[in-house]
Amino acid sequence: MLQETNFLSKDIIELSSKILGCNFIISFKKEKELLFAAETFLAFFESFLATSNTTIFPSSESIKIQFIKNEKISQIKYYKIEESFEYIFEFNRVDFLNDSKEICWKNMLAFLSEILTKNFVVENIEEFIENLFKKEEFQERSSIILEHRNFMLNVLGVKAKVFYSDWLSGKSFNNYVMKRKDFIVPPNSKSQNKSDSMSDDILNPEKVGHDKRNVFSIIDNELWDSARWKGFGYFTHLSVLGIFLLFDDETSCKKIFDGWIKRMGREDKNEEIKVTIVKGINFKNPYGYRVQVTSNLDIKSPKSGELFTLSSRFHEMAPNSSENLDMLISRYNNFKCYQFCPAILLDGKMIPLMDKSITKKQLFVKSAWEIDENDLERVLIMEGDCPVIPENVIDPPLLKWFKNSKK
């Protein structure tokens, strides 16, 4: 076997589907009806989103859904756990009988609306919906999807064997641990030369398959919207350097950092969070700078034919001098690490919330003129900016990028 498989043998089953680069993951206790429901929902999501290659872009790496059987509710109920990409679905029955299909249909559409607004960026929502129902025949396809359970039972039988345990007859078997540490990657049958890898096709989302798309995001858009990032600063206490993001809403900003701590621990060992300061964005205010928070991703050498989506947030600071920023950079160069944490205003004073801090080593500082077309920081250069370019810099990367972009 090329890859490890569990034959649907575990007590908790996971099914997943990669749609537009976002992984939809459904987990449930090993039960046939829940398996059929999970397959139905994944097919429903694919039918709704899979044809939208250029109009919808995910902002979350994954959508995690837990299925639970609950006979105390009338039909279907869903709710969010903590992060905007984790949900629980409760079912009374999962066979989608004729008298309950309308309720099921409405609940599934309501849930799609929920995840669309919180986990995706839609260019034109009205145009997208209209195209989906008028041209993509979504309603016709989804009506077939709701019959999935009936189709499966008609083909496989009411006592269908769908799990590994269904095939056992009291015999015991030995467990053999895989000796190979890495999966086998079959060689590419089609040779690709350099000119192929640089073709315009890889820049066209229409021609990039779902398995070639990836999402990299440490940003929970709903939480960031409610937290309202409004400032940036630093502090020193004894032998500790702290760097903070100032927010309006205490509850939401705590949840942002709780999500990061849950994901990577109290120390960002792999430097998944990238904090970047970009100086000299406008000669009219030479002391101004922008701070960006995003996933730490190297895109200098993207794989041919792949497309990725990356979420980030940034905030602009407009100080009257460079004193504070110069001091922060100087102290960071001395400490070589810092405590990254949220902060709030209390009685006019900035209060860092150190109980939510994460230890980090990397802090990126660059000037606007250094940014080229392959830098993640390019999104910080906006219309109306007039970046500061030192007189001794003859051919700055920024101007090369502008020239290549015909701007």
Image: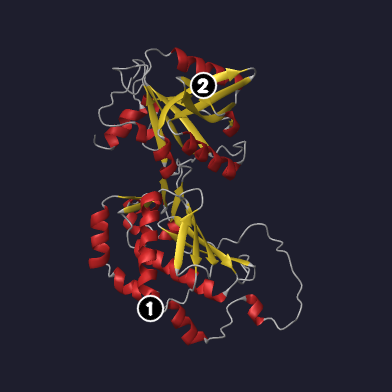
| Viewer-side residue, 323 vs 87 | 87
Q: Amino acid at mark 2?
A: Tyr
Q: Which residue is mark 1?
A: 99
**Callout 2 crowding tier (Cα within 10 Å): few <14, some 14–19, many ≥20:** many
Task: Please provide percent x and percent y for residue 219.
Answer: 45, 42
| Viewer-side residue, 366 vs 167 | 167
Q: Which residue is mark 2?
A: 234
Residue 278 occupies quadrant: top left
Task: Please provide percent x and percent y for residue 258.
Answer: 55, 40
Residue 260: image tag: none
Residue displayed at 74% across by 82% down: 170
Q: Secondary structure at mark 1?
A: helix
| Viewer-side residue, 305 vs 48 | 48
From the image, state whether disc 1 or disc 2 is nearer to you: 1
Residue displayed at 52% across by 85% down: 156
**Looking at the image, can residue 320 be seen?**
yes
Question: Does residue 252 lie above or below 62 as drawn?
Answer: above
